[in-house]
Amino acid sequence: MKDLINEKILNILEMNSRITINELSKQVNLSAPAVRERINKMEEQGIIKDYTINIDYKKLGYDVEILIEIIIKNNRYKDFKEFISEQDNVEFCYRVSGEACFVFKVRLENMEAVESFIDLLQPYGHTKSQFIFSSVI
Amino acid sequence: MKDLINEKILNILEMNSRITINELSKQVNLSAPAVRERINKMEEQGIIKDYTINIDYKKLGYDVEILIEIIIKNNRYKDFKEFISEQDNVEFCYRVSGEACFVFKVRLENMEAVESFIDLLQPYGHTKSQFIFSSVI
DNA sequence: GTTGAAAGACACCATCC
DNA sequence: GGATGGTGTCTTTCAAC
């Protein structure tokens, strides 16, 4: 399970998932088929969940990013999960311990959109919002 | 800026960033060079920040994921930023509004590792941790 | 694990509409 | 903005080691 070469492969793919197998094999000092096989296995095992891109949503007009905590009321867990799954501007949503039930991140065009979105949430529970100013990592 | 085809390309790349330009061009009903050019432009503009993978860290032995809020004390903002940037088990770290100064997500092997990590944070400020049970999105 | 060879697929570039 | 065609490269899948 713990394999230094596989970790290196994962690190490289994390930085650039469109790298060619040839280039990758040079960087880890293995043959291309060997690297291919290692990647296939990690895909089968689900260690590599998927290949994706990071998008700069600010450049697409989503100027506001918020973290929202919600304390679900009236036992509306299932409804909330359904609602949040349908939102395509939610980056992640975690079920967490502590006072809050869920913490999720949402991106919105402007303050008007923020207000509308928060309003949508009120039926499900009590919310607490934190605006994201910047990202250290 | 708002372009339906580009949005479709971004959506497809988000689901699978290793898709070939050929396959992508079929899905958006354009020629391969046309798609290549659109992607190049979005890369140049920084709309596409990078190509990456999603890793299932639980399968790599990181069984605990936590959200941590920290209220920085003694004006140690810069020190904290430096510290957190060096951690390779931190997925994101946001500067946020509200009571907390930063919110970040960290993955750790077990409870022992959690305790050690929290201890490391104490010089920088007061922390509040939320364990992540599961992910809705 | 490696190398080498084959077929097929792909990316890139120039050219053209 | 878009499409087409040619060239060289890459990936993949074998085989044998």
Image (cartoon, coloured by chain):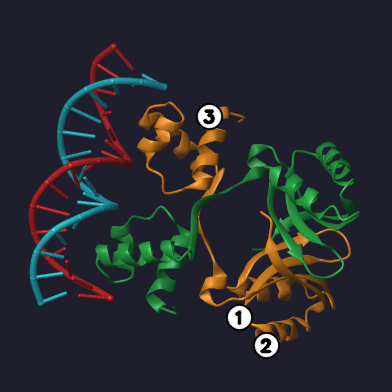
Chain colours: A orange, B green, C cyan, D red
Contact (CB < 8 A) between labels 2 and 3? no
Q: Earlier in the sequence, mark 3 or mark 1?
A: 3
Instruction: Estimate the x, y position of residue B82 in percent, counting from the top left.
Output: 74, 47
- What whole-number distance in Å separates the C-alpha atoms at marks 3 and 1? 42 Å
The local secondary structure at tag 2 comes to helix
Q: Amino acid at mark 2?
A: Glu
Question: Does any portion of residue B36 appear in the rendered image?
Answer: yes
D16 vs B110, left or right, is left
Identify the residue at image location x=79%, y=70%: B97
Looking at the rendered structure, the number of numbered marks drawn on it comes to 3
> Which label number is shown at residue A112?
2
Q: Which residue is mark 3?
A: A5
Report whether mark 2 lies on the same chain as mark 3: yes
Q: Which residue is mark 1?
A: A109
> Which mark is nearer the camera, 3 or 1?
1
Q: Amino acid at mark 1?
A: Glu
The local secondary structure at tag 3 comes to helix
Residue A58 occupies quadrant: bottom right
Instruction: Give the crowd class for mark 3: few <14, some 14-19, many >=20 residues within 10 Å.
Output: some
Identify the residue at image location x=67%, y=76%: A83
Of residues B45 and B52, the one nearer the viewer is B45
Of residues B111 and A65, the one nearer the viewer is A65
**Given the image, what chain letter belongs to the residue carrying mark 1?**
A
Identify the residue at image location x=36%, y=32%: A32
**Given the image, what chain letter belongs to the residue carrying mark 2?**
A
Q: Quadrant of the N terminus of chain B?
A: bottom left
> Which label number is shown at residue A64?
none
Instruction: Estimate the x, y position of residue C5 in percent, counting from the top left.
Output: 17, 27
